[in-house]
Image (cartoon, rainbow, N blue to C red):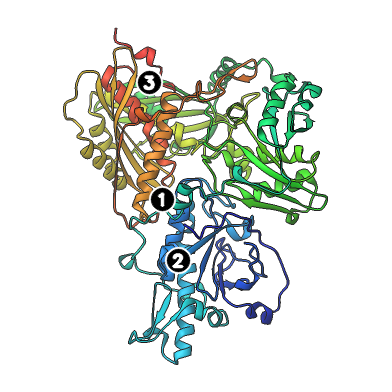
Amino acid sequence: MDGIISGEQTAVESTMSRRVFLQGGGLLLGFALNGASTDAVFAAPASQVIEGEVTGNFAPNGFIRINPTGAVTLVMPMIEMGQGVYTSLSMLVAEELEVKLDQIQLQHAPPNHALYRNSIIGIQNTGGSASVRAFWTPLRQAGAMGRNLLVAAAAKRWNVDPASCRAKDGFVFDASGSKHLSYGELADAAAKLPMPPISKIKLKDPKDFILIGTRAKRVDSSIKVDGRAIYGIDTRLPGMKFAAVAISPVLGGKVKTVDEKSAMAVKGVRQVVKIDEAVAIVADHMGAANKGLEIAAVTWDDGPNGKISSADIVKQLERESEKPGAVARDIGNVGKALAEAVQRIDAIYQVPFLAHAAMEPMNCTVHLQKNCCDIWVGTQAPTITQSLVADLTGLPKDTVKIHNHLIGGGFGRRLEADATLLAVKIAKYVDGPLKVIWSREEDIQHDMYRPYYLDRLSAGLNAAGKPVAWKHRIAGSSVMSRYYPSYVKDGVDPDAVEAAAEPPYALPNIYVDFVRVEPPGVRTSWWRGVGPTHNVFVIESFVDELAHAAKQDPVTYRKELLSHNQRALAVLSLAAEKAGWGSPLPMRHGRGISVQFAYGSYTSQVAEVEVAADGSVKVKRIVCAIDCGMYVNPDTIEAQVQGGTIFGLTAALYGCITFKNGRVEQSNFDNYLPMRIDEVPLIETHMIQSAEAPGGVGEAPTAIVTPAVTNAIFAATGKRVRSLPIDTASLKSL
């Protein structure tokens, strides 16, 4: 959309009288989205918006600005990283404000927990498939409040009852339709009206939606197609220098030697900056910086983690997983039920470390000065980034300006501020603005990885083959303990056990515990979902094992266990029906099914695969049924299902980060393989219409696709996949 502004937007506090506050012209509406206030409050008038910065004495979270020209600006509380959130959240406002989608302009929100808190997560960040869930009501309230005030202003001018007026496409019409005023003409007058409490604002009945639920075009498509979109890596500033970096290949290692003389001899190289964990070559352009870094021939002191290997990490997990963990769920008497079961099944599942490998590698531009620091970056967590930079520099937080940008792939990687902090450390030694760009090798080898998990499961079946006991122990890193420590209760990481502590099935005796095991020399973090991306694979694979042990069809078996859960049953039934479950397939072809409740949505997928005689796997078709509650844009949901499915498939088929001598062995797309376009299966999406509250979509297909594929492999070959990525050598025809 032409109106998207990619420059800086930072909230500036000011002291302002009511008279000055109202004189500037225009209407700015804000709403406290964190529950701290029940009333809407005015924010700065439009004339106070200078160079994209929103100023004024106000405390909203999400807000609308309407200036005297009629332009409507939404300061977006979430960040766009390809998931379509700028479109879906704009649709929420446009629906209630009664404007067309193309009448809304966007600005990136400044860092401010109090104003832009994601209520699902508790801080200002974009993640957890939470954007629509968190802002479904608040942004609709923002639009409805604006509409009511504008209608009231028009009615006052015409001396009529506001109930006789109506708003449409940025205008207010009288009862006859012969009179009309634009929102721009009404903005000043609306800004002077008393604000009714939000409790008095009536939202549209869903049956009256005009925009929500339709296939609206993405507002950011045109600028991405024609190159006007500005990502963090596109930042250009006068006098800017560029830096290429080499980071210690072993976590905790330090620089040993650098050939500074040779690096400085490269034309265009200006500085060699050494800090404990990295070397940066600062130059006039990236070509010189990269060449200088290559010639610098950096060597390293590996430190205490120089001998760590993947085998060591797995042994640690195996050892620790034999010990009891923090109890996440304990219903009934699992020990007694297992002892009395007619049949017992035990299994161990493992999933590897995974990198994000986003299209846009990590980068950050910094201008560090004596009294302030400006950061140009694409971040999912602007307030955390701001706070960490303030701590590092010793500057007051309000002097650290985060100029956020569109993100070329986040997947949770940009919830972390490590790349920004490294850039700031280097910028301390450089005059003027500095752009630091990681190479693809640095990006993959210094990622913060999806944790390695090892799961132990046991189940007991009765004479009818139904599970009477379910025991599940999860061993792995706790991302929550580092990132959101207050969320960890009694040793249980709620993310690590998500989708496992409360599976959708009827299980009379269930015991789930979590053993925290932090691998040495490895940093772990979010990865397009974490807990469900391993738990759903484990649970749905194990349920398939139980169905096989009970000699029952996997779909029929699940249906009996879901009779109490109508939404889960509905997506399972729809996916099976649309996939033609039970219809014949050729030899070494198979179908597999999975179902989950995660991120507030119910999802089921059926995968159809072909396993060649050499063990290679071709995923032919994926059928997805999803109930995500009330949905905003079906087109975006389909795109998210496709993208999330491919992301999950890539990991299932190829994803694996391994360590040798403390070093990550993978370095680029030649040995950390992405799924190729000719490997992508046909992906079908079927949405269930629902009146339930919105659920998340972006991470759901990533979590559910893997067990659908591995269960299909079992159907095709009779060989069970219990560790990832899929070992094709084990699937060879004998």
Query: Do the residues under discs 2 and 1 have CB atoms within 8 angstroms?
Result: no
Query: How many residues crowd mark 3 within 10 Å: few (<14), some (14–19), many (20+)?
Result: many
Q: CA distance from mark 3 to mark 1?
A: 30 Å
Q: For mark 1, what is the residue?
A: 695
Q: For mark 2, what is the residue?
A: 103
Quarter occupied by residue 274: top right
The one of 224 and 519 positioned closer to us in this rendering: 224
Amino acid type for the residue under numbered disc 1 = Gly
Instruction: Point out residue 58 in the picture as x, y percentages from the top left corner.
Output: 64, 69
Amino acid type for the residue under numbered disc 3 = Val
452 lies left or right of 332:
right
Label whose residue precedes the other's in the sequence (2 or 1):
2
Which mark is on residue 486?
none
Q: For mark 3, what is the residue?
A: 721
Q: For the view shown, which residue lies furthest in the left direction?
A: 584
Query: How many residues crowd mark 2 within 10 Å: few (<14), some (14–19), many (20+)?
Result: some
